Image (cartoon, rainbow, N blue to C red):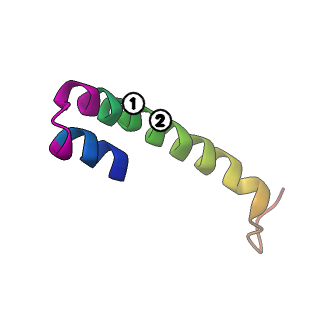
């Protein structure tokens, strides 16, 4: 995020910073979905049948 901010506002490379922001916009939801799907393996809920 710091690199993105520097590219955009310090070096004025708005196109590159925009591409980095879109890439983050895609990567973060993918990581979130994987994390939610895998969370059932790492958490035990008492009273829940397996």
Residue 21 lies, in percent from the top left, at 31, 36
Residue 11: image location, x then y, percent: 20, 39
Queried whether the magenta region covers residue 13, the answer comes back as: yes
Residue closest to the far front: 11
**In magenta segment, residue 45:** no
Q: Quadrant of residue 48?
A: bottom right
Seen in the picture, residue 42 relative to 13 is either above or below; the reply is below
Question: Which of the labelled discs sits on residue 27, or is there none?
Answer: 2
Q: Quadrant of residue 26?
A: top left
The residue stretch that appears in magenta: 9-18
* Residue at x-position 31% and y-position 43%: 4
**Quadrant showing the C terminus:** bottom right
Residue that carries the numbered disc 1 in the rendered image: 23
Give the main secondary structure of the magenta stretch.
Answer: helix
| Proximity of marks 1 and 2: CB atoms separated by less than 8 Å | yes
Residue at figure coordinates x 18%, y 46% from the top left = 10
Say which element carries label 1: helix
Residue toward you, 41 or 27: 27
x and y, in percent, of residue 30 in the image:
51, 36
* View extreme (bottom): residue: 46
- In the rendered image, residue 18, in percent from the top left (x then y), is placed at 24, 30
Whether residue 6 is visible, yes or no, is yes
Q: Residue at x 30, y 26 (%)?
A: 19
Task: Give the residue displayed 15% in from the left and 36% down from the top.
Answer: 12
Q: Secondary structure at mark 2?
A: helix
Distance from label 1 to label 2 (Cα)?
6 Å
Name the foreground residue: 49 vs 13. 13
Specify whether 7 is left or right of 42: left
């Amino acid at each position: 995020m710091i690199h993105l901010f520097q590219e955009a506002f310090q070096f004025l490379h708005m196109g590159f910073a925009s591409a980095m922001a879109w890439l983050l916009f895609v990567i973060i939801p993918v990581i979130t979905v994987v994390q939610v799907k895998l969370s059932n393996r790492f958490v035990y809920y008492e009273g829940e049948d397996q």
